[in-house]
Image (spheres, rainbow, N blue to C red):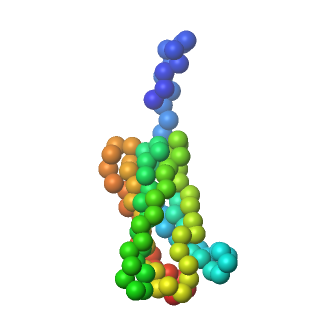
Amino acid sequence: MNVDPSTGVVSLACTGPAQLVFSTETAGCGGTCWGYVTGSGLKPAAAVDIYATSGSGTLSSLEGFADGQGSFSGGPFYSCGSGWHGAYATSTAPDGSTVTSNTVDSPCG
């Protein structure tokens, strides 16, 4: 909600529900990499935490931040051939609740 101090007019902005989507899209990175996260409706400047487990059992934890409008876009995060699996992301909605993405496995081993 915004109030124009000169007129007193109140404007409301409607946004959809907060969401995070983890995709298995691939891209070149000196090899092949995968894993993009997009988000919308998040709390502005909220941390976006990205997790996955490698084939050898190593847990990866990365962090980004939503922009001032509550949007996030990042990746690729993981290299092919390392057996990454169980990748997901979490963040915070404007009401303080936790937003969790879908969980995906490497499309390329």
Inspect this view and state whether residue 19 appears.
no
How far across and how far down the image is residue 42, in percent?
A: 45, 49
On the rendered structure, is 75 left or right of 94?
Answer: right
Does 2 appear above or below 67?
A: above
The N terminus - image quarter: top left
Residue shown at the point (65%, 75%) measured from the top left: 29
How far across and how far down the image is residue 67, in percent?
A: 53, 46
Inspect this view and state whether residue 97 appears.
yes
Residue shown at the point (45%, 64%) measured from the top left: 62
Does 8 appear above or below 15?
A: above
Q: Nearer the viewer, residue 13 or 61?
A: 61
Q: How many marks?
A: 0
Q: Residue furthest top?
A: 6
Does 33 appear above or below 20?
A: below
Residue shown at the point (47%, 43%) measured from the top left: 44
Residue shown at the point (38%, 51%) measured from the top left: 92
How far across and how far down the image is residue 15, in percent?
A: 48, 44
Q: Nearer the viewer, residue 11 or 34?
A: 34
